[in-house]
Amino acid sequence: MSANKRRDKLSKVEKKKLQKEEDEQRQREEEAARLLAEQEELQRQEEERKEQEEHQRLELKDRERREDELSELRHLLDEMQNAVARWKHEASAKTKWERYMRCDGTPDPSIPHEINGFISLWNEDTEVQIAPVLESCSLAQRLIEELEDLLSETPQSAGSSSDTHRHQETILSLQELIHSKHNQATEEILKWSRANMDIETGNTQTVVRDADVTLCLWANLNKNPRFKGYHFHEAGFGFELPKQLAVSDVAVRILHTRFDHLSCLSAGAHHISQGSIKTEESHPSTVEEGDGDKEQQGSTEESLDYTDEDSVRSETRKSFASVASEKEEKNGRHVKELEEQRWGEARRDSLQEETAIAGERDSYFPPEPPATLVETEVVDLHQYTPLGGVFYFDAFRIPPQSQLVNGWDVRELSDTGLQRFPYPVDESQLHSSTSRPLDEGGALVSPPVGVTVTLPNSAVFLEDPQVARWDPVACQWTRESIGNITYDASLKRISFQMDSFYPFTLLQDMHINMPFQSWELRPLGLNSAVLVVTAAVTEVHFTVKQGHHCMLSSATEYELPHVLGRWMSPSALQKAVRRAGLDVFASESSEKYVSIDAKEPSIAQAAYEQMALLSCAVAFSWSRWNSHCGREQLVVQACEHLEAGPVPEKAWSLYLLNAERTCRLRIREQSESFSTALDGGSEFHATLLHMLRDGMGAPGHGRVRDADPFFVDCVLQLLMATRVLSYC
């Protein structure tokens, strides 16, 4: 018993001893940790003090040379801009002299008396054969594009406003005249429809094409009530007609122009130049039958307008559609009487079928369209771009045909010009005994017309194309009254229906390629570089060389022979790439449609200028940290690169730019978090140019010094157009 008590006492003593030893050990460890922490804190404070002193030293050094670096940068940019301005002036003078020496009759569109004389003579020209007409239209289109280029490259100033307005008026006059000549040539072909009738179909089918236009024309001579439609296989276009048109004296035209003369009339369109063409809401004007108006009617009847957009082109011109409508009412009564008889016969045989068609039509065409377009139906031309040109889908009355009488070819003469066939036909124009399908409200129903087109090979559609038709009253593209859209991606063919005949176009989202996934600007040698933009859908390569030339050298798997591998000026390249559907160029309104971390424009502009100056010897690339540094700062990867081929991954360094200075960062692209800590041995510089030149060898300095100013300007324009620092 006592032995057990002694063992218990010993264990208690041992426990107290062990506890005391543990407490002492813990105190010693805590003291050591405290001393170590104090030592580390002192060391940290010492390092911070040294870093602060070094930072102050670098800032002081930067302030001392800041003005000199900024002055040198301004001097280099001024030299480049002055050299480019002189070159452009000399190139313009050379072009004018070469045009003068050619003596081929081609006018200079910038000289008023030359272009006005050309327009006047061409307007009076009575040539209506399709081949020479298309040749003249092609020349006029080249003059339009020359004026558009002149407007886009001419800076706006008080002294140039009158020239700008004159050039815009010239463009509109040439566009009107082109459309007028197309109509005159169409009328001439239709006058000989019976003579050119196809024996197999009993109708006339004509296809004429050149580099700018494809004209498909069909004249209904057979009037077969079972006729459904026709496909122009060589052009890839087709149409479908309801029975009420299949028994009428109607001609159908699909005129495809690779250019777009309608979008510039839209109130929401991009400006033709930096100075916009102001448009006001226009309404069809009525022409009174007065002596003073007959002369104007004579000039407009021969060039029936496609739409009412010419009321926007010029406030002084009467609406062609209104003139044609009045002439139809005065001179077409005898034609209507014959058609009413045919309509009645055809309707009695096909009432049941058309009622079914009308029921189907009501499922996607409202019986009474609203007076104003729904906002979502109107095409925003800052968000969507027409691709492949414009398709003019028209119905015309067949002109009087010639008849052989006693060996004489006799033709009824008409001064009405090409007359549009009204569809849907107003109920008042039909015979009272004619049966027509009605909707639930008792309103007259006309079945839709169908159209099929193969996508133009001049453009790439990166998604299924959308369709829009031209609204002649509001002068804008709209998706209203278009239904049953089907797209065959394997055949690149789209089909749809409309409630009437309208010009239409195919649309693509302008920003489908944004934001970019990555980009890289890499030197290829002296005065040679490549800008690679890996966009959201495609990857494009722009190659730049000496002499203010650049080209689209590669575009992911797309064959565009009219664009790929062709040297152009930067502005021409941008226009060609946009028309080809590979748009990677940002506009002023792009930020509204693309989610990006926008950068301060002045800081980004300064970065583009310095990147262009260094592009002969330094490679630049995107950085994921650019989106982490805020609006007022930029982060890019850069390194000297004088050899051909890709840049080694380890060669890149990160640089931080803001309005005050530039520095090299300690972090790398693969770092876990963002930090603005300076890399060891780095200094502050006022410009990226001097920052990178500091670590550059003699060969690199030589390349930068010997860089051609036209090459530098070309790189600069591409960087400013793509805005890679904001859209990646």
Image (spheres, rainbow, N blue to C red):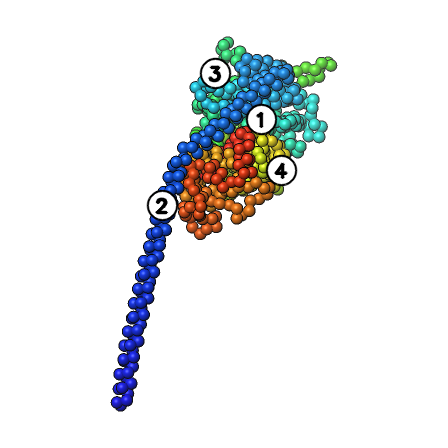
Give the CA distance from mark 1 to mark 3.
27 Å
Label 3 amino acid?
Answer: Thr
Q: Nearest to the eye among marks 1 and 3: give it.
A: 3
Q: Which mark is residue 675?
A: none
> Quarter of the image holding residue 707?
top right
Comparing 286 with 279, the one in front is: 279
Whether 44 is drawn above or below 539: the answer is below
Give the residue number, with chain letter if any, for mark 1. 395
**Which residue is label 2 attached to?**
53
- Numbered disc in front, either 2 or 4: 2
Q: Which residue is at 44% across, 52% downward?
A: 672
Q: For the residues labelled 1 and 3, say whether their Cβ atoms are less than 8 Å apart.
A: no
Q: Find disc 3 in the rendering and name its residue.
A: 316
Q: CA distance from mark 1 to mark 2?
A: 83 Å
Mark 1, mark 2: which one is toward the viewer?
2
Element under disc 2: helix
- The reply to whether residue 69 is visible in this rendering is yes
Measured in 3D between alpha carbons, the distance from the residue under mark 2 to the one under mark 4, in whole angstroms, is 59 Å
- Chain-order first, disc 4 or disc 3: 3
Give how far apart the Cα atoms at labels 3 and 2 are. Answer: 75 Å
Q: Which residue is mark 4?
A: 559
Q: Quadrant of residue 642?
A: top right
Place of residue 717 in the rendered image (x, y in percent of width and height, measured from the top left): 51, 32
Indicate left or right for 450 with 691 as reference. Answer: right
User: Between disc 4 and disc 1, whose residue precedes?
Assistant: 1
Residue 456, given in percent of the width and then of the height, sits at 60, 34
Residue 70 picture location, percent across and down: 43, 32
